[in-house]
Amino acid sequence: MKLHEYQSKTIFSKYGIPIPKGRVAATPQEAREIAKELGGKVVIKAQVLVGGRGKAGGVKVANDPAEAEELAMQILGMSIKGLPVRKVLVDEASNIDQEIYFSITNDRAAKKPVMIASAAGGVDIEEVAAKTPEKIVKMHIDPIIGLKEYTARDVALAMGLPKQYMKDFTKIALGLWEVFKATDATLAEINPLVITKEKKMIALDGKMLLDDSALFRQVELEATRDTDEDAPAEIEARKYGLSFIKLDGNIGCMVNGAGLAMTSMDVIKLFGGEPANFLDIGGGADSKKVAAAMRIILTDPNVKAVLFNIFGGITRCDEVAKGILVAMDEVKPKVPMVVRLVGTNAEEGRKLLENANMITAETLADAAKKAVAAAKG
C-alpha cells in the first residue's frame, strides 16, 4: 500500500523528523488560504501515487496567495500518468543549498533492513545509481539490535556530510527507523532531504510503502488507502480477503496457496500460454469466497479459459466445487473451465462437477496443457 507525500510527511513529523510547514488542499480556494497563512513563497505539489510529478507539471512555485490559487486550479485539473489529481500539498518554499537521498527499506537477500543514502543527489538518485554507484552508501540494520546512533553517524561520515550536520542527520535517521518499524513499512524514503541556506535539515518530500500482509495491524492507515491506481478487480478482491493481481494474459487462474499459484503460472507459460492474473484464494476458502474469485476473474474480457488448481489440505475440494458451481450459475461464463482437484474430498468435488461441462485433469502439467489449448481454441 502506497501513501501520499502529505501522509508520509505527517507520520515523519510525529517521530521528530523536520518537515516544511504546510497543509493539503482539495480546492484552489483552500490553497489560497493556506498560502496566506504561510506567507511568502509556497510550493504547490500534486498528490498522486506516481513519480515524475515535477516533470509532468505537477509541482509549481507560487509567489503569493493569488498565484497559489491559480496554480492549484491548474494542477487540480490535471491527470498525471492516468491518475487524477484530487489534492495538492501547499508547503512553504525552502532555500535549498544541498539535496540528499535517504531511505530505509528491506534487503531480501541479506534478510535485514538497509539504509540507503547519497549526498550526490536527491530527486535524480536513479541517475546517480546508474552513473556513479560508488556515491551511494548502504548500511544494514540488525533487526534485533535496531538502529544505533553510531551506525547513523557512520552513514553520515560515509556520505561525506559536514560534521555540523551530524547530530541533525542522526536524529532524522533514528526517527525514520522508528517510522519504518511502527508502520510495518517496506520503504520509508526522504527524497530529497535538504540542507537549507539557513543551515537546517528538512525532509522536503516523503514516500512510504506499507506491507499489505501487515495491514491488519495498521487499521487507521489502511482506511486512508487511495484506490485511484488500483484495478477495480483488485479492489473487489480485497473485500473478500483474496490475493489478486491482474496480468495481461488470457488464462484466468484460481489457486489456493501463493507458491502453488506462482508454480501454476510458470507451468502455463511453459506450455505456451499467458496467465491473466495471480489469484490465491488461501486456505479454508468456502464456496462464497470461491464464487467471488470466479466473478472477479471473469470480469476480465481478455480471459479465454480458466484454470483451477486446488490442493485440498485445509481447503476442501468439495467446497471449492460448490463455489465454482455457484459462480457459474451467477456469472454464466462462456469460456472453457479446466479443473484440477487433488486432496481432501477431491472425489466428492469431482462428482459435483461431472455434469457441469468442466474439463478435468489429474496433474498440473495436463491441466495447463488443456487450459492453453482451450484458450487458443
Image (spheres, grey):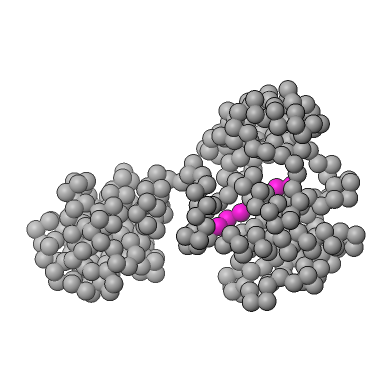
**Point 68% across, 76% down: residue:** 145
Magenta segment, prevailing SS (helix, strand or loop):
strand
Compared with 270, 123 (above or below) is: above
Closer-to-camera residue (360/64): 64
Quadrant of residue 54 within the rendered picture: top right
Closer-to-camera residue (105/361): 105
- Residue 123 visible within the image: no
Tell whether 190 sits left or right of 228: right
Q: Position of residue 219 (x, y in %)?
A: 50, 55
Give the magenta-colored segment's residue range.
204-210
**Point 82% across, 59% down: residue:** 168
> How many discs appear?
0
Tell whether 351 sits left or right of 207: left
Residue 46 among magenta residues: no
Q: Position of residue 164 (x, y in %)?
A: 90, 59
Tell whether 232 sits left or right of 205: left
Tell whether 104 sits left or right of 196: left
**Point 49% across, 58% down: residue:** 215
**Point 80% across, 60% down: residue:** 169
Compared with 182, 45 (above or below) is: above
Compared with 66, 98 (above or below) is: below
Q: Position of residue 253 (x, y in %)?
A: 32, 58
- Residue 288 visible within the image: yes
